[in-house]
Amino acid sequence: MQILDFLSVDNIKMNLESKSKKDAIRELVDVLVKSGKIKDKKKMVQILMEREELGSTGIFFLLVAPEGAAGAHLKALARISSLLKDKYFRKSLLSAKTPEEVIKIIQEEEKLKH
């Protein structure tokens, strides 16, 4: 599984404005609502906040999957986690200025890893 199998330019939010965890989650969910991936913002924020109460899951990405897709969700999470362990990759992502740059950086990294 590759990150670009489920990530697109319209699902990338650069420079979050939020200062709190809940506001950051709302801001990221807004991106998914605008792109048509999520229909019920209030319910999704509630689900994510309930999950956060069990333990923080913050790793720079918001990854959501339909109920019953735990296997694919875990594979995607493992892939993201693996890439983020590389400090040069993280530095490149942090220096990206546009969603298109983020996609290009991830594409290049995934070519190197495969």
Image (spheres, rainbow, N blue to C red):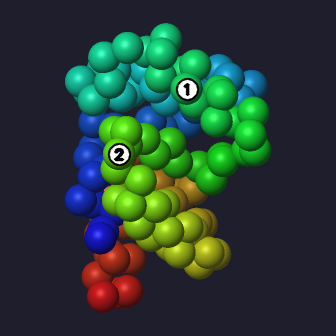
Dot 1: within a 10 Å radius of its alpha carbon, few (fewer than 14), some, or many (20 or more) residues?
Answer: few
Q: Quadrant of the N terminus?
A: bottom left
Residue at 28% x, 36% y is 10
Q: Nearer the viewer, mark 1 or mark 2?
A: 2
Q: Which image quadrant is residue 12 in?
A: top left
Image coords of residue 93 (percent x, y): 51, 60
Say which mark, if any, is on residue 68: 2
Q: Quadrant of the C terminus?
A: bottom left
Q: Please tell me whether residue 92 is drawn above or below residue 24 in the rendered image.
A: below
**Left/right of residue 28 with respect to residue 12 in the rendered view:** right
Indicate the amino acid at tag 2. Gly
Residue 68 visible within the image: yes
Q: Which image quadrant is residue 75 in?
A: bottom left
Do the residues bearing badges 1 and 2 touch, measured as CB atoms within 8 Å?
no
Query: Which residue extends farthest front?
Result: 68
Q: Nearer the viewer, residue 76 or 93?
A: 76
